[in-house]
Image: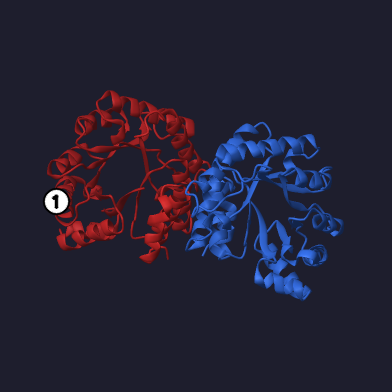
Chain colours: A red, B blue
Amino acid sequence: MLIVGERLNTTRRAAADMVARRDAEAVRKEAIRQAEAGAGYIDVNTGTFLAGEGDALRWLVTTVQEAVDVPCCIDSPNPDAIRAALRVHKGRALVNSITGETGRFEALLPLVRGGECSVVALCLDDAGLPASAQDGASKGSRLIDNLLAGGVRIEDIHVDPLVRPIGADPGAALAALGTIRVLKEKYQGSPGLHFICGLSNVSYGLPRRSLLNRTFLVAAMAAGLDGAILDPLDGDLMAMVHAAEAVLGQDPNCRRYLKAHRAGRLG
Amino acid sequence: MLIVGERLNTTRRAAADMVARRDAEAVRKEAIRQAEAGAGYIDVNTGTFLAGEGDALRWLVTTVQEAVDVPCCIDSPNPDAIRAALRVHKGRALVNSITGETGRFEALLPLVRGGECSVVALCLDDAGLPASAQDGASKGSRLIDNLLAGGVRIEDIHVDPLVRPIGADPGAALAALGTIRVLKEKYQGSPGLHFICGLSNVSYGLPRRSLLNRTFLVAAMAAGLDGAILDPLDGDLMAMVHAAEAVLGQDPNCRRYLKAHRAGRLG
């Protein structure tokens, strides 16, 4: 399971403060804690800084990379900020995210073709959010095919089915799970295709969100999700990731599960 | 989700003591606690009493039914004990379990045909335990077809895919999940078919078993499980059942989830 550590996102108050103060020490600590907890990428997002986003993002990438060897997940609504961040990033970043929206697709494709980074592909297009499993799969499939045609390798694509809140639509999580299943089936000849998503949308507006988030994570892993953008310092959530890998046959001889147990990480 | 409360099974020390002492007061309390926690059936199993099993089971059924309105899941390796218990049981019991083993099938079919009870159908036959998803589905499918031919209604059948320990075979849980998926697909024209299983086998021999059990439960519910034999007094497990029903679109407007939250049952 690929874990993208979500804590250095300025929609979080603590991260916004660190970035506003350019507190490199605090950022480095946060990056190290996430990497030590199992993050394979450190998500960096300074979208709340608006006009200052690009400068903030470059600074954040550079500061994170002073501290840890794992690459960044460069997360922005703004293609210019992504381009600026990729210029200073060392190693293979994950770009979060390209979509099927014409403008965004055309702006980002030149940045992600050529194999120097991988990319989150959101099942979203000019017609908007996916309304159902089948609709999400159609949007996803068109986007995947356009990325492949544009020169992106299939193993560099992490499809995000875009989960909506179950509080607003009881079928929202089922639609995301169905999108994963349909696309996994369609591209089964290309086992390199990845699936990723954020967890917290699913529980928006409901109590005990962490319980819903980790429940959704298990269901999504059972459907084929192999990456998630989450808080790796959430012990209950990470314990469930280890348990799900063991249950789903992704952890030979339950070796990682037993190791996490010995390290006191299963609670 | 159908919850079968597993606590009145004499493989549990406390239950064995209650039954050995014929402590009706303790049994009634245990039945009431499970029903109040959401059990739709109270499992009764006195298999450890060997020669005294039939007497013990009849007493247990009668005592449980003095206390609660929910019916019993009559759980025994011994068809004679099941027959004796069914004679004293009021209402529609769940018989646990019929299998594809010739002797057991022939002994139990007369007890479960005719619509007066429902039955757990274990994916097991004369050739033994299922070795894979496809093997489990073949065994299950033959058993279902034989039950239907024998006069059992499809909505009275609760297929148990028979989950083996992942500590012994990393693919064991995947095989059970696959069995459910294949059979659900095969009998999709008959949506009344149910799926049930016990949880604790999956984690046998590993630490933090409850974590693995509830992780498996979510994956199995995502695959189509609609019943489980479990301890309804395990708060973490039941919280996850509520969360999974909400995530999987089985709880319109998250009404039961919110009710459980208000009752302090989500932790």
Residue A204 visible? The answer is no
- B75 and B49: which one is in front? B49
Residue A189 lies, with reference to residue B57, above or below; the image says above
Residue B80 lies, with reference to residue B7, above or below; the image says above
Q: Residue furthest top?
A: A149
Q: Image point 52% across, 61% down: which residue?
A: B210
Residue B27: quarter of image: bottom right
Q: Residue furthest right?
A: B87
Q: How many marks?
A: 1
Q: Image point 87% across, 56% down: which residue?
A: B87
| Left or right side of B133 for B192 | right
Q: Quadrant of the C terminus of chain A?
A: bottom left
- B84 and B183: which one is in front? B84
In percent of width and height, residue A64 lies at 18, 54
What crowding class fits label 1: few (fewer than 14 Cα within 10 Å), some (14-19), or many (20 or more)?
some
Q: Which chain letter goes with mark 1?
A: A
| Left or right side of B20 for A38 | left
Give the labeled residue for mark 1.
Answer: A62
In percent of width and height, residue A220 lies at 45, 44
Q: Image point 76% across, 39% down: which residue?
A: B147
In percent of width and height, residue A97 lies at 29, 39
Classify mark 1: helix, strand or loop. helix
Residue A235: quarter of image: bottom left
Residue A106 visible? The answer is yes
In percent of width and height, residue B179 lies at 58, 40
Q: Image point 46% across, 47% down: which residue?
A: A248
- Under mark 1, the amino acid is Thr
